[in-house]
Amino acid sequence: MTEQGVQLDELDAKLIELLEAEPRIGILELSRRLAVARGTVQARLDKLTTRGAIKGFGPEVVPARIGFGVMSFVTLEISQRYGHDAVASHLAEIPEVLEAHTITGSGDILCRIVARSNADLQRVIDKIVGYEGIRRAHTIIALAELIPYRTVPLSRAATRE
Amino acid sequence: MTEQGVQLDELDAKLIELLEAEPRIGILELSRRLAVARGTVQARLDKLTTRGAIKGFGPEVVPARIGFGVMSFVTLEISQRYGHDAVASHLAEIPEVLEAHTITGSGDILCRIVARSNADLQRVIDKIVGYEGIRRAHTIIALAELIPYRTVPLSRAATRE
DNA sequence: TTTCGACTGGTCAATCTGTGCATTCAGTAG
DNA sequence: CTACTGAATGCACAGATTGACCAGTCGAAA
């Protein structure tokens, strides 16, 4: 849980941006586009990945395109007796739970879940609340995606200061 | 906004899973591990990406590791006069806004934002609400990540039925 | 039986990757 | 002012991968 990360410089940001745009271009092509030596690109990518700034280059699966068109955020209120961990492992067993966080405020846990349809969402929620540790669920359905998940502007912002 | 996606089969799921685990292994290695012909792997990946099931293979930047250790979900209530689109383009200009959705329920928009610290979060929120179209913001801070964003279990679940 | 789509297994030239090395350059400590 | 260090460059090499082909196989549908 160490916070130690990387201070990006401009080259790092451009690297990330280029990769984000065309992930399959390869290190050599990257070095050409950025007008730096190939070794430099390799070194930078190494640094970024080993320090954790870049988690990986996995395929980004779009749930909506594999049959899960409904997305929602669910706030859970849990019983004190059961720890967060127990609830977390319960949630982890449900594939439709894409992520979960403990949060401040009225709820205890916020998680993102997807489902095949609104009816199917009911099934998923039932599966979630069908566990003693969870007392109550409050569901918010996402209607439209105004801004798809992005990090490029952020990494650009991380450089200039 | 077409819902037409792909019905994954087992090979697709394994492909995604393998790529998720070791994204840099290349098509040839994939074909070896899955014990299928190289052309098959190429064809499957083509199908998945062209149909949109896989958005891309971009680098996954971890905000926490580039100096943005605070993550939060903010619910916005917007003025009726201003459309969602206007608010969306305002939000899009703020790098710390990683994603945004219109939602059901009490709020109108839910967005995910990051910041360098709690104090910095205040600055970001001020930037968000410093726009006429937004009437009110309700902030939830994420304390711990119980389940990091994942899709592998989902794609596995998408096959068996 | 014929057709079709998907998969296999193979080849080819072109390209990229990982690696190592010597060199340059700027900033820092002594 | 002089060493030292880290970072970047340019170059070279062998080995591996890629994209593009092609002919053959197989099962399901027409």
Image (spheres, coloured by chain):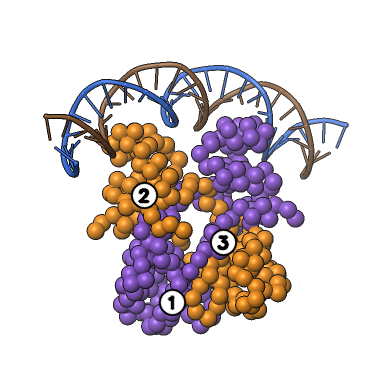
Chain colours: A purple, B orange, C brown, D blue
Which quarter shows the C terminus of chain A? bottom right
Along the viewing direction, whichever of B140 and B48 lies nearer the viewer:
B48
Along the viewing direction, whichever of A10 and A21 lies nearer the viewer:
A21
Nearer the observer: mark 3 or 1; the answer is 3
Q: Residue at x 57, y 31 (%)?
A: A28
| Callouts 2 and 3 close, C-beta under 8 Å | no
Tag 2: amino acid: Glu
- Left/right of residue B43 with respect to residue A144 in the rendered view: left
Residue indicated by mark 2 = B17
| Callouts 3 and 1 close, C-beta under 8 Å | no
Residue C22, picture quadrant: top right
Marks 1 and 2 share the same chain: no
Residue indicated by mark 3 = A147
Q: Residue at x 70, y 52 (%)?
A: A159
Protein chain holding label 2: B
SS at mark 3?
strand
Q: Residue at x 36, y 38 (%)?
A: B43
Tag 3: amino acid: Ile
Residue indicated by mark 1 = A139
Give coordinates of residue A142: x percent, y percent. Answer: 48, 69
Tag 1: amino acid: Thr
- Left/right of residue B87 with respect to residue A75 in the rendered view: right
SS at mark 1?
strand
